[in-house]
Image (cartoon, grey):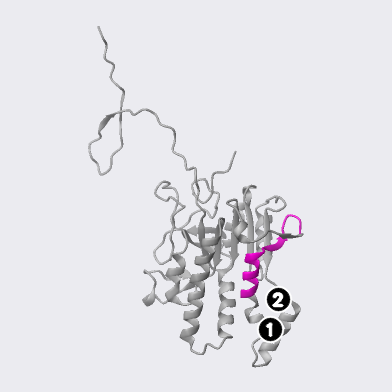
Amino acid sequence: MTTIVETPKRVLPTLGGAKPASVATPVPAPAPSVLYYPMNRTLLFGAGGSGKTTSVTSILRNPKLKLRVLGLDSNCIAAMVYSIRRMNLSLIPGQVVVSQFVLSPAERAAFVRSFTTAAVGKAKSSGKDWVEKQMGDFTGIDLATGQSESCGGIHTFDQDTVLVIDSWTAFQNHLIRNFLSSNLGADWETYRAVQEYVTNYMTALWACVDCHVIVLAHSKITDKQKGIRGAVIVPDIYGQAAVQSFAGLFSDVLLCRNEGGKPVWVARENGALTAVRNIPLELYPELKPAACPPDFLDPRYSFFPPMEK
């Protein structure tokens, strides 16, 4: 005589107070895993001291990831070193290379002359030219050794490399000075030229690099009557019409904010122009959309593959 054994059943949780359904327990399956992590394009924006550099420094806890920082802000290296020391990190040679924009003596003299003469100083466009040169041959200071290091062109950077532009606001200011120094007379033409350059520049950058890219920018407050999609706090992009299109070039747009002396990420909040794809808020209820940990290596996030234990 054959004995029929019923498959054990379990009760599944349901939504909306519906009556639980009793179903057969499925055959156990291996836990889902992501084998491919695409190259991320992240825009971090916020006021000075809000934690943008600290957020980037968190990546250095993974010794297999390399940072290449294109620094146009005058305090770029100082801010990076401060964050590394505060987090008590030990660097590996070649792990983080910072290229800091500094005017040469001739450019400084030209910059001073531009204040006293009608002629346009060479320094007004040197920032733009310097960035384009660094993109072809990235050379900077290895913060682990203090020595100059040549890293090659950014098109050679691999998937273990993160290119950081610190900051886009400073680069944008160099662009504005460059275009204002040309023969453009009308202000609207300057806006159009800079906005077109910005869009083309970022589009070309995404097309030619195979590494992660993080762009830092300052924030600005717009007129409430002219808010972008209701957002009042937005990235400081030249020309309000270009803000939304510029933000649309990134996979994640996060607002950095300092709360009680601690930086946080604002992933979702009314009044802030943000977009989030690598922070699964729906999967982790403990994550507060307006106060996420500013840590690219947080295991709940999907910016980079999990660290090996």
Residue 250 locus on image (x, y percent): 47, 61
Kindly identify the residue that appears in the image at 73 percent across and 55 percent down: 144
**Which residue is the site of mark 2?**
103
Residue at point 63% right, 81% down? 124
Q: Is 132 or 257 nearer to us in this picture?
A: 132
In the image, what residue occupies the spot 51% across and 55% down?
A: 40
Which quadrant of the figure has residue 80?
bottom right
Residue 247 point in image, percent of width and height: 46, 66
Above or below: residue 221 compared with residue 206: below
Task: Answer whether residue 145 is magenta in the image.
Answer: yes
3D distance between C-alphas at marks 2 and 1: 9 Å
Instruction: Pick out the residue farthest to the left.
Output: 19
Q: Residues within 10 Å of mark 2 (few under 14, many from 20)?
A: some
Query: Residue 266, how many percent across, how many down?
Result: 47, 59
- Choose the circle earlier in sequence order: 2 or 1: 2
Kindly check if marks 2 and 1 are in contact, taking CB atoms under 8 A apart as contact. yes
Q: Identity of the amino acid at label 1?
A: Phe
Q: Residues within 10 Å of mark 1 (few under 14, many from 20)?
A: some
Say whether residue 236 is visible.
no
